[in-house]
Amino acid sequence: MLARRAELVRTATLLTAGDAHLAEDLVQSTLTKLYVSWSSVRRADNPDAYVRRTLVNALIDERRRLWWRRERPVAELPDRTAADPGSEHLGDDLRAALQKLGPRMRAAVVFRYLYDLDIAETADALGCSQGTVKSQTARALDRLRTVLEPKPFLAQGVTP
């Protein structure tokens, strides 16, 4: 599993819409959960699906925590890198649009279109029905289209 850590970090970065720090935390949490239940992972028919499901569950658990909803003031701002690792192929517009999706919608889009999983594999990773994957994906794509569509000049207050 440690050999696939980079792939897990990349997936987690996509699921968190480019938040590299949260992605690292999710991967660590996922690896810990996998270690504890290693016998179940080894018995799984599809270990990759088991890992994806564990990663998504870790993201959902993280979002449900109360402390996540509160601001935490700090004395100094943390240093930031020029680009978040693992998400360099995402443009700023797409990353910002992904941030406007809920975690389950974002996960559905990432698994379906960036990882090219079919509906059944995505449903297994998210722990939901195939119908839920279809509806989450459709809603997410509608929202992404709305957010990413170019605005006409007059709507932006710019005259041609």
Image (cartoon, grey):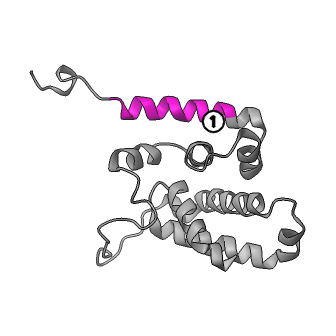
Residue 4 appears left or right of 69:
right
Please, which residue is most extreme toward the left here?
Answer: 160
Q: Nearer the viewer, residue 77 or 127?
A: 127
At x 57% / y 48%, what residue is drawn? 110
Q: Which quadrant holds the C terminus?
A: top left
Q: Looking at the rendering, which quadrant does residue 12 occupy?
A: bottom right
Q: Nearer the viewer, residue 54 or 60?
A: 54
Residue 150 appears left or right of 121:
left
At x 33% / y 75%, what residue is drawn? 78
Q: Answer whether residue 141 is magenta in the image.
A: yes
Q: Answer whether residue 22 is magenta in the image.
A: no
Q: Residue 52's spot in the image, x, y percent? A: 70, 59
At x 43% / y 59%, what residue is drawn? 87
Magenta residue span: 134-149
> Looking at the image, is 68 positioned above or below residue 81?
above
Q: Residues within 10 Å of mark 1 (few under 14, many from 20)?
A: some
Residue 13 appears left or right of 83:
right
Residue at the disc numbered 1: 136
Q: Looking at the rendering, which quadrant does residue 84 occupy?
A: bottom left
